[in-house]
Image (cartoon, rainbow, N blue to C red):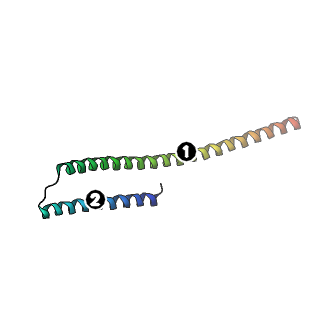
C-alpha cells in the first residue's frame, strides 16, 4: 500500500468515525427531545456492534502495519540480492583474471 492509499484509508476511517459520532449525538438528542427511553435490546445490540467494530478496526490497523513491514522486508531482500549479485560478479571477474593470468604464465613458460 503506497502513502496515497494509506491517506485515503485514514480519511475514510475519519469520515466513518465522524459519521458514527454524529449519529450517536443525534440519536441522544432525539431520545431526550422525545422523552422516550431506549429499548434495552437496541442498547445491547448497539454495544455489541460497537465492540465488533472496535475489534475490526484494531485488526485492520494491525494488518496495515504488517503490510508496511512486509514491504520494507521485500525492499531489504531486493537490496541484499543486488549486493550479492554484484559481489558474485566481482568474484567471477577476479577468477577470470586469475585464469587468464595463469594461462598466460603457462603459455609464456614462466
First along the sequence among labels 1 and 2:
2
Q: Residues under labels 1 and 2: Cα distance?
A: 42 Å
Disc on res. 3: none
Decide which of 33, 102 is in the foreground and name it: 33
Which of pointers 1 and 2 indicates the residue nearer the eye? 2
What residue does disc 2 label? 20
- Specify whether 93 is left or right of 9: right
Question: Which residue: 25% across, 60% down?
Answer: 21
What residue does disc 1 label? 77
Q: In the rendering, at what x and y percent does residue 110 appear?
A: 85, 35
Density class for disc 1 (Cα within 10 Å; few <14, some 14-19, many ≥20) is few
Decide which of 9, 107 is in the foreground and name it: 9
Q: In the rendering, at what x and y percent does residue 67 appear?
A: 46, 48
User: Which of the 4 image quadrants contains residue 105?
Assistant: top right
- Specify whether 94 is left or right of 19: right
Decide which of 42, 100 is in the foreground and name it: 42
Question: Which residue: 74% across, 39% down?
Answer: 95
Decide which of 42, 88 is in the foreground and name it: 42
Q: In the rendering, at what x and y percent does residue 36 appear?
A: 13, 58
Amino acid at each position: 500500500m503506497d502513502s496515497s492509499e494509506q491517506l485515503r484509508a485514514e480519511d475514510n476511517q475519519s469520515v466513518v468515525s465522524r459519521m458514527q459520532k454524529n449519529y450517536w449525538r443525534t440519536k441522544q438528542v432525539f431520545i431526550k427531545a422525545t422523552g422516550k427511553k431506549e429499548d434495552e435490546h437496541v442498547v445491547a445490540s448497539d454495544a455489541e456492534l460497537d465492540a465488533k467494530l472496535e475489534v475490526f478496526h484494531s485488526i485492520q490497523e494491525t494488518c496495515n502495519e504488517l503490510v508496511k513491514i512486509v514491504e520494507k522486508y521485500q525492499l531489504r531482500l531486493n537490496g541484499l540480492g543486488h549486493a550479492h549479485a554484484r559481489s558474485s560478479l566481482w568474484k567471477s571477474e577476479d577468477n577470470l583474471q586469475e585464469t587468464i593470468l595463469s594461462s598466460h604464465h603457462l603459455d609464456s613458460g614462466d
